[in-house]
Amino acid sequence: EEPTWVAGVVQEFSAVTQLEPSEARRILEMHGFELDPAIDAYFSGDGSSMGAGEGAARRAREESRGAAAAEEDQDPRRAMAEHLPGGRYDAPGSGGAPSHAGSTGAASGAGVVATGQPGSLLASALRSIVGLFSSGESQVPAEAAAGRFEAFFSRRYQVESPFVPQSFREAAALARNQGKFLLVYLHSPLHQDSDEFCRRTLASNAFRHFAQQRLVAWAGSLEFPEPFQLMQSFQPAAFPFVALVMCKPGNQNEALPFRVEGKLSAEDLVHQLTLFMASAQEELSRVVAEQRRREESSHLRQEQDMEFQRALEADRERAQSQSQEQGEEEAKEEGAKAQADLDAAIELSKKLTKEANLKRKRDKLQAEPPVGPDTTKLRFQFPNGSKIDRRFLANQTTQDVFDFVDVYMGENELSIESYSLATNYPRRLLEDKTQTLEQAVRRWPLQ
């Protein structure tokens, strides 16, 4: 899938060259979608960058205009200006007044200014360019725009760029955190001195070493919204334009009285920067101290907040633990109480059942019969050593004997849950409770 920024580059190239988007895309593909090399190749008359129809049209224009007109037509700055509302460009040496910035820089007081005319026409032209690419997918994010210029600078001048590939806001934060001045370079792609200033001054070893050691340097091309908005804030009188910014705490950025508006050699630029930075070092130190104080205060508040949160969490955990323990204790007590109530209910049920059974057996039990041929006397001996005699009829069942024993033990509170009945001799267990005594013992009468 094609990156979204490609459509923006195609639209930009098409607007500058007045080519159809398909033809613009074909030429850009030949230059790896790098805008500046493609524009340079197109306006330099590189036949490989033009289709057959475009080349024939160009040759016809050159023949009608003559050699002088053809030479002017090759200048990319003229072509770009002609395609903008109210655009105008006077080539160097043509006798016309320069429509852009002056070309000579000079020191003035604590700052650096340059002779030359204001770049109002250039600003108008750039405003038109930015207006062409300020909506939809063609709008490039600030950090991407800075990164593209940084990559363009390194590729075009074959040096390591001294500029950070970040947005202006991010570069300001970096300068603030490092306690350094922020150098801002606004690159005008329409200005005739921009390329020479970049090549001889900004790409020099002297400036790059100085910037990497002493500054945070940021640059942006005015064809993108963020640098263009900065240009409106700085209101430069001419280009190339360089300024210093002091990044204060609270995201407050103050433009300092140091400006380069025109060409300046690398040695002069480094010298003037050194002088100004020495004069403003005390203020920078104060700003750095204030920044550190704010950071320490913020760090202290964060630590206090974290300690407060930890204390709250500890209190919450302690309260939760106490509540849990209390809940467990209450649940344990409730469980014990419920178990006790259940045991009591079971005991009561057993007691009531036992009393009901005793009553039923007592009501069912026949009175002790008198001595006779159909009766027998049984002697019962209990574990506690007590003995009792009782007469039964021969036709009474073994169950009647068990009922008598149960009633006797219940009335005398003898706690015996399980027992058995047996004869002494011959020893025989009375297990079948449906048998009569005569059938159970097989020897009658029992004595």
Image (cartoon, rainbow, N blue to C red):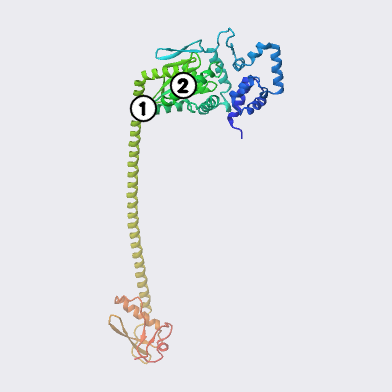
Question: Is residue 186 shown left or right of residue 9?
Answer: left
From mark 1 to mark 2, how far is it between C-alphas? Answer: 21 Å
Residue 126: give x, y in percent of width and height. Answer: 55, 18
- The quarter of the picture where residue 213 lies is top left
Q: Which mark is residue 440?
A: none
**Vertical arrangement, residue 4 with respect to residue 58, above or below:** below
> Where is the N terminus found, in terms of image quarters?
top right
- Whichever of labels 1 and 2 marks the residue nearer the N terminus, that label is 2
Residue 324: give x, y in percent of width and height. Answer: 35, 51
Numbered disc 2: secondary structure: strand
Disc 1 + disc 2, Cβ < 8 Å:
no
Question: Is residue 302 shown left or right of residue 74?
Answer: left
- The quarter of the picture where residue 356 lies is bottom left
One can see residue 310 in this view: yes
Q: Tell me if mark 1 has few (under 14), some (14-19) or many (20+) residues whose alpha carbon lies within 10 angstroms of its own.
A: some
Numbered disc 1: secondary structure: helix
Say which of 298 and 117 sits in front.
117
One can see residue 228 in this view: no
- The quarter of the picture where residue 306 lies is top left
Query: Please, which residue is most extreme toward the top here?
Result: 95
The amino acid type found where label 2 is placed reads: Val
Residue 24: give x, y in percent of width and height. Answer: 65, 25
Question: Is residue 114 shown left or right of residue 298?
Answer: right
> Which residue is pictured at 37% across the width and 71% down the height?
353
Question: Is residue 111 shown left or right of residue 141?
Answer: left
Query: Please, which residue is most extreme toward the left here?
Result: 385
Residue corresponding to mark 1: 291
The amino acid type found where label 1 is placed reads: Gln
Q: Nearer the viewer, mark 1 or mark 2?
A: 2
> Which residue is pictured at 45% across the width and 27% down the height?
171
Residue corresponding to mark 2: 184
